[in-house]
Image (cartoon, rainbow, N blue to C red):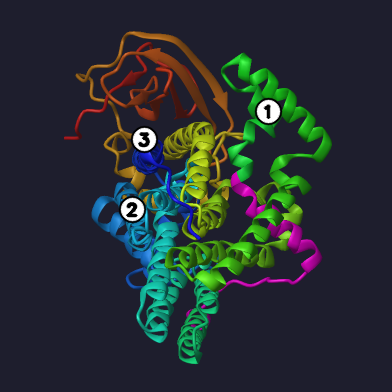
Amino acid sequence: MTAPAWPGPAGRLLPTTTWILAALYAATGVLAMWLLSPRVPYADGWRHLARYLELSFPADVLTPDNGHHELLPNLVRVLDLRLFDAGQGFQVLVGIALALATLLVYWRGIRGQPDAARRAGGLLAIALGLFWLGNIRALAHGNESVHAYCVTLFLAIGLHALVRARGAAEGAVAAAACGLAASFSFGSGFACFAAFALVLLLRRSGARAWIALAAGAVLSLLLLHFAGGTGGGARLAPLQQLPMLLAWLSGPSLYAAWPLLDPQLASALPLAAVGVPAQAVATEYEAAFGPAIAGPWPQQLVGLLGLAWMAWLAWRAWSTRSAAMLAGLGTAGFAVAVGMMIVLVRLDYFHAHPDQLLAPRYVVWSSLFWAGLLLAAVAGNTRRTRAPMATALVALLLLPSHVWMGMLGQRMGDVAAEAALAATVGVVEPGFDLGETPIGELAAALPVVRAAGVAVFAWPESAWLEREWPAGEPRLSAMEGVEVEPVDNLLGDEGRRLRFATEAPCGRLLLLDAGNRVAGLATRRRDGSWIGWMTGRGPLPAEVAACAPPLR
């Protein structure tokens, strides 16, 4: 028998609070995507950009990269290159649209819930899975958000087709098409077929639906194979891979409780009243279990509990077959399948680099595991307020991590911007923080990008590099604390790094040598100071910096 809802103000307060939390996470997630995403290539973006410039259409779109077929994301990236000089903003906007569209499709299934508390709780669960800033690596990076949220959108559409279609076979055909599209959006997209198969199983669908879905999966595999570049290296070692999978599923819990698990991060907390006890807990945790990022057994236990919860919800769904509950379980099943694919093909890599098992780039997938379970719990709980209340409590507990993961995203954007500036000048010193950008890929991409005059080389300041500064043009005279340090250069001849303070009406400055040559660039940091790099050595003029006027 269904328990009654809370009467009076208490019954209205829960859904209102939950709606507010869902809106908060969605709004701040979108803002983070727009404000924190770097407007320069970063990480894989450099390699992608060089490939697009070297190939003509349609090879630039169809050619796989690192085992991933990204046909639809490549279309967006190539449009960004051809129409907007690879300024990244178009990719960011498309990523935002895809993430919001995913939320909207899930909402179409959630809105059928019988009361406001469960509707609000279900929407909050998916908003957390998509927009919690634990996903900052995908959210705040246009190159990543395009392929990640292409996959989530096709997952959502396919699940909606399965749980809402009048005929199981018709829904399976639509889901198979979505699985094919997701597979050609990113490697993780093929896991959609596992999600759809779980829903067919729980719906007790007939042979026609299974045949349609299986045909879509086989067609996808054949097309991926004949398109080439499907990757390889899968190796089955269950006793090693199962603990990895369990730890991988626990990824969101690591970033939700990070300062309590990592002494270095705890020591960086600004408030001593919080930082000191957090550091004590984190130090004890690391001494007992080892580095949290390597996925020790407490995190494996979290993953195991999650799978047990999923099994219990699936048992309940077998009899209730609620549409929203099936969508939630399908979402969780998708994430499990992604984790299985990753540990199958990257076993040796994780042995060599154990800290990469729980890297932030995977959280966009593992967070969907817990979001799906929360949605299934909300939709399937006969006590109308219990599961929505638990979901609201989870959202409140995640708010601190929402802040510090946003700070991590801000730091990532700063690293990307400074690395791009140094690369534009052609001076990258040893030990320079390039984030996730491999120096080899950056060095290989730079000549191609420079020749095309796109991305960082479309900046008006870049056009001044190696040119003579006109005698009549002004320079900045009020510069304080100028520090010049010679540095070795991974990209060529020796160079130097400059730090200084000044007031300037521009976001980037030209740096001039004693021969009036524009030899470098500088950028303003968040603290108001400036950092820049120059080629060459030797004395510098007293007025070394200038804002770039238009080229004549």
Q: Amino acid at mark 2?
A: Leu
Q: State whether residue 422 is above or below residue 333.
A: above
- Secondary structure state at the residue bearing disc 2: helix
Q: For marks 1 and 3, give the CA distance.
A: 45 Å
Q: Amino acid at mark 1?
A: Gln
**Within the image, what quadrant is residue 102 found in?**
bottom left
Q: Which residues are magenta?
A: 225-252
Query: Depth check: 132 or 493 in front?
Result: 132
Residue at image mark 1: 264
Q: Position of residue 57 (x, y in %)?
A: 32, 71
Q: Position of residue 244 (x, y in %)?
A: 72, 57
Q: Residue at x 28, y 26 (%)?
A: 469
- Which-is-in-front pick, marks 1 and 2? 2
Q: Earlier in the sequence, mark 1 or mark 2?
A: 2
- Secondary structure state at the residue bearing disc 3: helix
Q: Earlier in the sequence, mark 2 or mark 3?
A: 3
Residue at image mark 3: 9
Going by the picture, which residue comes out furthest to the right? 288
Q: Position of residue 4 (x, y in %)?
A: 44, 51
Q: Residue at x 42, y 81 (%)?
A: 172
Q: State whether residue 248 is above or below residue 395.
A: below
Residue 236 lies in magenta, yes or no? yes
